[in-house]
Structures are given as C-alpha cells and as structure tokens.
Image: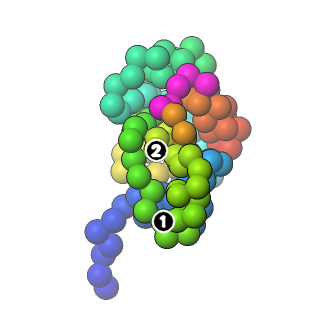
Amino acid sequence: MLKSIFHPSVVAVIVAAGLTGCGEKPVTRVYETAHEQPVTCLRIAVFPPDDALEKELKRLYDFSRECDAVLEVRHKENIGCNSNQNIQQKALSAFPHHFLRMEVRRGLTPVYSYYIDLQYPADEEDARAAFVRLRTDLKF
C-alpha cells in the first residue's frame, strides 16, 4: 500500500479551499483526535511573527510552554486564488488576497483546523473571532 506524501491536515485545507472557491466564510474541521483526547491546554506559535496577533491571542487565553498541544497561527498577504469557479468574481469584484489559518496539533497529529480568506491582512479582530470559534468547536 502506498503512503500519502501529504499530511492529512494539509490535504484537508487544500480540499476545503478548492470546495469553497476562496470564500469569505471560515472553513473548520474537528479531527477525531479531538474527541479521543480533548484539548486542556495550548502553547502558541505565530508564523510569520506578528506581535499584534500574538498579543491579542495571549489576552484571550493563558498559553503554556509545557503543553503538548500547539496552536499554530499562520497568516499571509498577497495571495492569489486559482479556482476556475471564481473567474467572474475575480474580474468583477474585490477578491481575497490574504488568509488566516489556525491549526491545533499534538506533534504531527492534527486536532483542529480553521481557515478563512480575507480582503485585508489578518488583524486582532480576525484572530479573536477565529479563537472564539476554535474554543467553541473544541469545547474547552
């Protein structure tokens, strides 16, 4: 049996982005591992580093460096969506060029993922909304 070269969380984000066609609503996924071993604490990693996003998240939650579960926050600017479903929207309206992704993992095992396309760079309000959704979805 051939092993996939892609990590399941990467495949999930790629599939979700393709199915939504770069939408403005978040795409979330709670993995089975979240039910098997609930999240009780988190440590944080923000890429690329962004003091404002990290400060807002630390205001919302007391992260611990000793925790085995990590909240990885990724944001990017000036991206392009290549979905063929959006040709008309790209030509006639503003199209998202930024994204915010949050993923909770234990080692390489995914627990939760959150992804949203944005019209503007991710800010504190986006991080707050994503984290509130994450806590609601994971129930901690």
- Report the side of 26 relative to 1 (left or right): right
* Vertical order, 108 against 39 (above or below): below
User: Could you tell me residue 127's position as x and y percent?
Assistant: 56, 29
Residue in the image at 32% along x and 73% along y: 4
Neighbour tally class for label 1: few under 14, some 14-19, many 20 plus, Cα within 10 Å: some
- Whether residue 62 is visible to the viewer of this picture, yes or no, is no
The residue under label 1 is 83
Query: What is the number of the mark on residue 64?
Result: none
First of labels 2, 1 by sequence position = 1
User: Could you tell me residue 65's position as x and y percent?
Assistant: 39, 23
Q: What kind of element bears circle 2? A: loop
> Which amino acid, by three-letter code, is at mark 2?
His
In the picture, the quarter occupied by the N terminus is bottom left
Span highlighted in magenta in the image: 121-125
Residue in the image at 67% along x and 38% along y: 133
Residue in the image at 39% along x and 47% along y: 79
> Which amino acid, by three-letter code, is at mark 1?
Ser
- Whether residue 123 is visible to the viewer of this picture, yes or no, is yes
User: Could you tell me residue 36's position as x and y percent?
Assistant: 58, 53
The residue under label 2 is 97
User: Could you tell me residue 107's position as x and y percent?
Assistant: 36, 45
Neighbour tally class for label 2: few under 14, some 14-19, many 20 plus, Cα within 10 Å: some
Is residue 30 a member of the stretch shown in magenta? no
